[in-house]
Image (cartoon, rainbow, N blue to C red):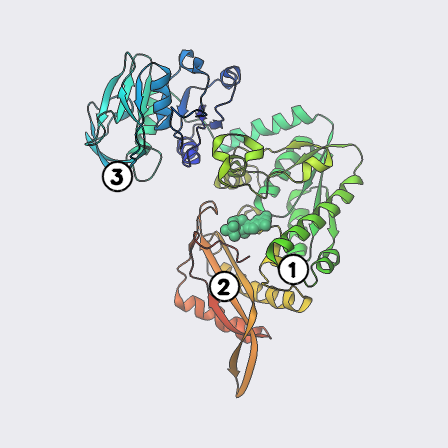
Amino acid sequence: MIVVIDFGSQYNQLIARRVRECRVYCQIVPPTADIEFIKSLNPEGIILSGGPSSIYEKNSPKIDPAVFDLNIPILGICYGMHFMVDALDGIVKKTDKREYGFAELKIKKQAGIFKDIHESTTCWMSHGDSIIKLPKGFVITASTDNTKIAAAANNKKRFYCLQYHPEVEHTPKGKRMIQNFLFNVCDCKRRWTMKMFAKKSIQEISDSVGDKKIILGLSGGVDSSVTAMLIHKAIGKNLTCIFVDNGLLRLNEAAKLKKIFKQHLHLNIRFVNAAKLFLDALDGVTDPEKKRKIIGKIFMDVFEAEAKKIKGADFLAQGTLYPDIIESQSAFGGPTSIIKSHHNVGGLPKKMKLKLIEPLKYLFKDEVRKLGTAIGLPEELVWRQPFPGPGLGIRIIGEITKKRLAILKKVDAILLEEIRANGYYKKLWQSFAVLLPIKSVGVMGDKRTYENIVAIRAVTSKDAMTADWARLPHKFLAIISNRIINEVNGVNRVAYDISSKPPSTIEWE
Ligand code: XMP
């Protein structure tokens, strides 16, 4: 495995992804990590990430320099390079001017991490400080017009450093450079498979939980379903899942999920229908954040009340994913975390005094889907589009009433039926309808109508951090619009959302 030291770069997840794409396991570790902890992971190589700090800033992140005595290959990227050079007695120059953008990299020798890479290739620069003197034993291995020391190496010690970012798409041969580091320098093997992960994870759960009980909030989404299945394989009947129907699910969703869970998973599930509780509390509420708070709080109350009925439970399982961990300051503590605090991390556990089990916490979404398939989860669960916790509550803009909920459910069901029937469901990250709080004039037959407007949102994305609106064919959009207006009373206009994230978000509220 490879350890990535998180110095705070926004590209850290990309580094981890690149390594795992090569089927080598990789874990991101904060710079505060103890050297003994790093040793215990038994890494075949270490990557020091980039970061926003300058090495000479007072509180710039630093790792124990003892990593340089571990006798394993180290690759320093941007800030990681500065840290390496500074720690080994070279000199980094602080500059006020940033070099940002494409640069032509001239490689001196096609060896080490530059094996089989053309002597001239494009790279992506994004740095303030530069190296002016290399530590003893290092040589320059590549330069650009602006940056003489764009790459350097101490081949004997197997230390490599790059001023540019090999992990981003803008460095076209970057993937190859990372592969070279893994296979040519570190001698890693392509061994990381989901079957292997599943086996290890099931064993770990079973070792740490023994004959104790675990509770899990099952939403029907891929993350909680995979978590449930994995734990079920480890401890069987000692896992109890709680499924809370908040009344804000898609049309017939609760019943469909019940059927799938019963047919395929043989899980021990408690279904709680709390729709009335949620809808009563949301009566008259229009502010999106208030809606979220109310839905979150009632979910917690209902879940807790149900969980109390399960005697002797010591653990709470959650389907937290790696991006949630990296982005959540409270959960991880590394400098990258500051970007965003995620709704999936924290919350339940603190209040319930249960020990947390998060078996997916080092996986990305596409890896979770692969894991789901590897452990035999049915396609219809593995390939479900993400659905937000507050459900249709944040897709009815303005007040949530039974009547408006019924309209949106019908519209959404038609949309999804067409999306599935025409082979778009798996291609889209999410597709859904939004009910707007305004009415528009229309004409049906010979009569004037004054009815609701719905918007259709369909996006492509890799991880929900960024998203693009899907270029669905006009012919297909026409079918959807016709069906909705013809079949749903109370709707006389359909709009298609053509905004990307950023600057818009995926959900409307
Ligand atoms: P946005 O709208 O921020 O959404 O682009 C990004 C992803 O998160 C989902 N989402 C939520 N999920 N509770 C959730 O569990 C929420 O309050 C929430 N808000 C947005 C959204 O569907 C998308 O997948």
Q: Which x, y percent locates residue 323?
A: 50, 38
**Tag 3: amino acid:** Phe
**Tag 1: amino acid:** Asn
Q: Which residue is mark 3?
A: 102
* Disc ID at residue 252: 1
> 321 or 286, which is in the foreground?
286
Label 3 SS = strand
Horizontal placement of 262 versus 508: left or right? right
Mark 3 or mark 2, earlier in chain: 3
The residues bearing labels 1 and 3 have C-alpha atoms spaced at a distance of 51 Å
Q: Which residue is mark 2?
A: 456
> 160 or 339, which is in the foreground?
339
Query: Which residue: 58% across, 73% down?
Result: 488
Query: Which residue: 72% across, 37% down?
Result: 351
Q: Is residue 380 above or below residue 112?
A: below
Assign the N terminus to one quadrant of the image.
top left
Assign the C terminus to one quadrant of the image.
bottom right
Horizontal placement of 166 versus 241: left or right? left
Q: Is there any visible trace of residue 220 in the rendered image?
A: yes
